[in-house]
Structure formats: structure tokens, C-alpha cells
Amino acid sequence: MEFTERLNALALKVENQKNAIKTEEATKTAFIMPFISSVLGYDVFDPMEVVPEFTADVGIKRGEKIDYAILRDGEVQMLIECKLSSLKIEHASQLYRYFAVTNARIAVLTNGEVYHFYTDLDAPNRMDSKPFLVLDLADLDESLVPELKKLTKENFDLESIVNAAEELKYVGAIKRSIAEDFREPAPEWVKYLTSKVYDGSFTQKVRDQFRPLVQKALKQFLSDQVNDRLKTALGAGGYSAVEAAPAEAVSSPPVAEADLDRDTEIETTLEELEGYQIVKAIACSEVKPQRIAHRDAKSYFAILLDDNNRKPIARLHFNGKSQKYIGLFDADKNETREPIDALDDIYRFAGAIRERVRAYED
């Protein structure tokens, strides 16, 4: 698999298994060792590459240990400190002490889902207080993938990533700040945006009046931007159309070829596209993600392998007023609908989705 596919596969594993992880050792085994091996490409069983429980004596303290040290040519390049997956990453004081007594230029603090990467931009051989890169497997930022790839065994480029670290640090921090303000606008931002549209004095009453308006406007703006991008991606001339099987049918054959070419008035919803992305993320553990395609119909949303109507992977039945369903296919391509209450419920059928893709490949 390609680097991005391996990263997505690990992200899916973390999403499916994190609720079952109860100890720090389980976090290491289930999430962090696969990150070191399958994503970064280092052999976790080769002590010339990865040293678990690496001893890092600090001052008068002896026997201090770091969870993992990654070596290249006998020199420590990265230190990794692990926390229980259910814990929020808040401080890196222990890692800060270790960093100063090794040759490492990169330090990582992680709970298996969120990875904070540090270096020594502010002072040589002293770990910065803030990370230059934050990788969240639950919300992957594709712009960070090329930088993360520089830390892999195959493409290790310490100089390049350290040179880019300052920009990454501040751009990432600004993006996270903007995201926080979209969720809950800071008083300064409320005042600034209000001053653009309101000429009166900015009193406490005006602040209280405009804060929910600013929050609503920000959310609508973001939604409009997403919808514009989707319209561009899907084409302004309308969507590829398919005619649905009867809504009441529980078992049905795959989409008919004639139906796939028929133009009908179909509205593809954002929720259907989000569901498609989840199915795509699941299936990309078996095939390249670009092979997973979708076609919409009046009463269902079809997800296909190789954009081939004879290779249906799943159907999303989201057009009903209340209950949503995901349609899954057996070896004879008969569809069975399974009720879901939220998009995350699709992950419960990850095994069936992968099995269907593997069957087409075989």
C-alpha cells in the first residue's frame, strides 16, 4: 500500500478499536507499534532501528526510560513517549527532560490517535514547549502527509523537516485557533466582525446580541464553502444518475446498466457523500482509494468498485424521512439492508465491506 493508504488504514483501526483499549501497554501494541512499523517503516523488532524502553539518564536521576527511541546509523533520531489512548495529550514535561540528554532532534508525544511532534526551534537541544506538527488520526489533515513522510525510514530528511518546522508550527497553530473560533468565537473576534457591520458602540448588550449571530454566520460560511467545493467536484451540469430498485425491497439485484445511464433529477446530499467517504476509507485497506466510485439514484446512493455497476460494494438509503439504512451485498449480489442511526454506524459493517471488495479482486 502507498503511504497515505497505510495511514488511513491505521486511522480506521484506531477508530474501530480505541474503545477496547484499557491500558498503556495495549495502546502501544495496538496503535503505536503499527504506526512506527507500517506508517514510518521502521522494524520494531530490530534493536538497531527501534529501541523500546530506551534508557535516558537525566541529571541525578538514573534509569529514566523513554518508551521508544528510533535510531539511524547508530544515532538516536526520534524519541516517542506514549500515553493511554483514552487520555488527552496535555503536557510533555517528561519528554522534555529526555530530549536534552540525547542527540534526538524530533520528539513525539502520543496516545495512539493524536501525535504531537516537537523539535528545538526556540533553543538548541531544548525541546520546544509547543509542537510543530499535530497529527490527529481521527481528523487527518492531508497537508501534513508530505511532512510526515519525511520522517519515514525510506524518505528520512531531518534537515528538510526541521527547516519547515517553524512554518508548520505557526500555520498549524493558527488553523487550530481558527477552528476553535468557528466552534466558539473568541470575544476579540466577535468584536472585530461586529465592527464591520455595526456602527454603534460595542456594549455588553451588543456583544451578547452579536455573539450567536457571529457563530451562526461562521457556520453558514463554512457550509457554503463546502457546498461550493462539492458542486465543483461533482460537476455543475448535474450528477450521474441511476434509477432505484423498489424502496420496499429488502433483497435486490445490482444496478441495471440502463438505469445507470438514465438522466433523472437527483440531489446528492452532503450526508451521502460523507457516508461514501467512510465506505471508501474502509475499502482502501483492500484496493487503491481511487478505485472506489459512487453513483446516485432517486432512492439510494450506490458505491461501486471501478465505477462498475456489476461490482456493487454498498448502497446508502438515506432518502427516507427517519430511518437510514446501508445496503450490503452477498456473494450472489443480493442486497440486505441494515439500519443505522448515525454515519459512524457504518464502521460496524467494515468486515462485510472489505469482504465484498476482496471477493471482486479474487
Image: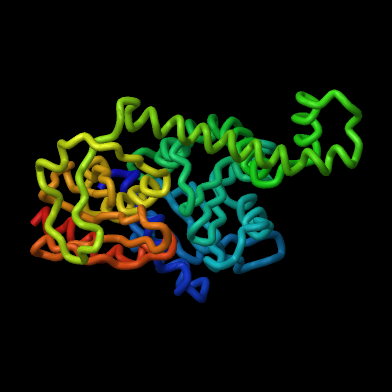
Residue 120 in percent (x, y) is at 63, 40
Q: Is residue 302 left or right of residue 360?
A: right
Q: Position of residue 97 (x, y in %)?
A: 66, 56
At x 43% / y 65%, what residue is drawn? 341
Measured along the vertical axis of the image, is residue 36 above or below residue 292?
below
Residue in the foreground of this view, choosing between 198 and 49: 198
Residue 296 in the image: x percent, y percent?
27, 44
Residue 98 appears left or right of 43: right
Is residue 274 found left or right of 98 in the rendered image?
Answer: left
Quadrant of image for the C terminus: bottom left
* Residue 38 in view (yes/no): no
The count of marks equals 0
Q: Residue at x 56, y 65 (%)?
A: 83
Looking at the image, which residue is at 58% across and 60% down? 56
Q: Nearer the viewer, residue 122 or 141?
A: 141
List x then y, in percent, for residue 229: 43, 31
Residue at the location (52% across, 66% down)? Answer: 85
Q: Observer-nearest residue: 114 or 357?
A: 357
Quarter of image, res 189: top right
Taking depth in this image into account, of 184 and 58 the one nearest to the observer is: 184
Protein image colouring: rainbow
**Image quadrant of residue 51?**
bottom left
